[in-house]
Amino acid sequence: MPRTRTILHVDLDAFFVSCELLRRPELRGKPVVVGGGHESHPGDLRQPGRGVVAAASYEARAFGVRSALPLGRALALCPELVVLPVEIAEYARISQLVFAIFAEFTPLVEPGSLDEAYLDLSGTEALTGSGVAAAQLISQRLDQELGLPCSVGVATSKIVAKVASDLRKPRGLVVVTPGEEAEFLAPLALERLPGAGPKTTAKLHLLGIDTLGKLASAPTRLLEETLGPNAGALQRRAQGVDPSPVHASGVPKSISREETYSQDLQARDELEDRIVILSAAVGSRLRASSLVARSVTIKMRFANFETVTRRRQLPEPSCADHELQAGALELFSESWSEAKAVRLLGVGGEGLTEFRQLSLFEEGGERDERLDVALDDLRGRFGGRSIARGTGSLDAPLDWNRDHLRPLTER
Ligand SMILES: [Mg+2]
């Protein structure tokens, strides 16, 4: 039986606004939003007509003002609203102080964004007390040392911890006891589950499923018929089952490159060339970060704005251009037809791991990856975008290929 984990999801409350209030304490208790390009106070003639709310104080939320609401609409709901411009560099600076506190509790911290993170405290309980005690201590320290309020969920998995942290904001602490995950989730609305987007929840509502408990106990076959092959994964999350590990910072979840074309592309060979190039760019980034990807993804947006993403597992976790390219090209030929003009194309690597953790440098594989590292090195030394392996080139015509470089790696 797997050991029980202790995972915290810490989420700062109205983070951008909280950051602003640190230097503008006179605005405490007032309806405040961050958003738009310039400051505006009630009665100002120059109103911030454009832009959207990036964050709203709880006083503003009482008027129905929410993130992503256009500023004009927010002001209509709440004429007393104070609007502050977004100072993202300042929030990033404060975020580093927040993460420095997290790091004192565990090395296993996975950032979700500037203001939220998962902390895996499994096995550190002896040092930090129980997960609950650690949660209390973290929120106390954020409050006393930085003046920032937060909400924390404590559970045995990321998904349950995340739902818990969101449940009693602001300054919430919600603890889900091991074994009670399904019970905790059951009465909650579907929309509480990260990953259950509006399309998914609308389809589930049509089946009479409006709570996580109903989703958890619905026949999986029925869900798959309605939602497709990923329904089982969603259902397990609704049951509180989520074995996904907390990825320490430094290991991103995915690395991707995408480009939008000024004129839609429709020729197969042109599209394949771009995929080869994008894959090489992803490979290069992976190698620069000492990462390998377990799967490759492509993303295509067509002229009518329909967007498809496809994923395929690689035979072995890899950072080799040719593996990524082969996977991406297969995905492409499976999901593109001649009639479709493409306005955006992306390639990504997912399921990332640091490559020294894996024994993947076996016959052949090792040489290929060394070759790619050599290519990266040359790209770096010769000002960059002139070398690509195989077909396609980054900008210039192909001036090197892998055979030219093979001697470099066969020392
Ligand atoms: Mg937050």
Image (cartoon, grey):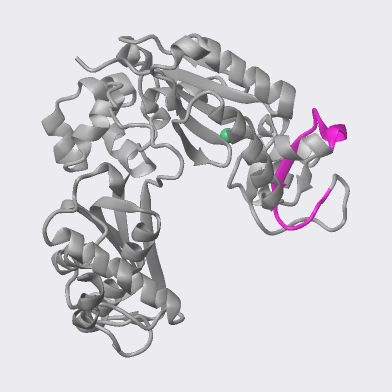
Magenta residue check for 28:
yes
Q: Residue at x 23, y 44 (%)?
A: 358
Query: Looking at the image, is 47 positioned above or below residue 27?
Result: below
Quarter of the image holding residue 28? top right
Left or right: residue 157 versus residue 207 is right
Residue 278 visible in the picture: no
Left or right: residue 222 versus residue 82 is left
Magenta stretch, residue numbers: 24-40
The percent coordinates of residue 403 (x first, y second) are: 18, 81
Quarter of the image holding residue 134? top right
Query: Looking at the image, is 315 positioned above or below residue 155?
Result: below
Query: Looking at the image, is 100 positioned above or below residue 320?
Result: above
Magenta residue check for 151:
no
The percent coordinates of residue 385 (x first, y second) are: 40, 80
Ligand 1: which quarter?
A: top right
Residue 78 visible in the picture: yes
Left or right: residue 214 versus residue 125 is left
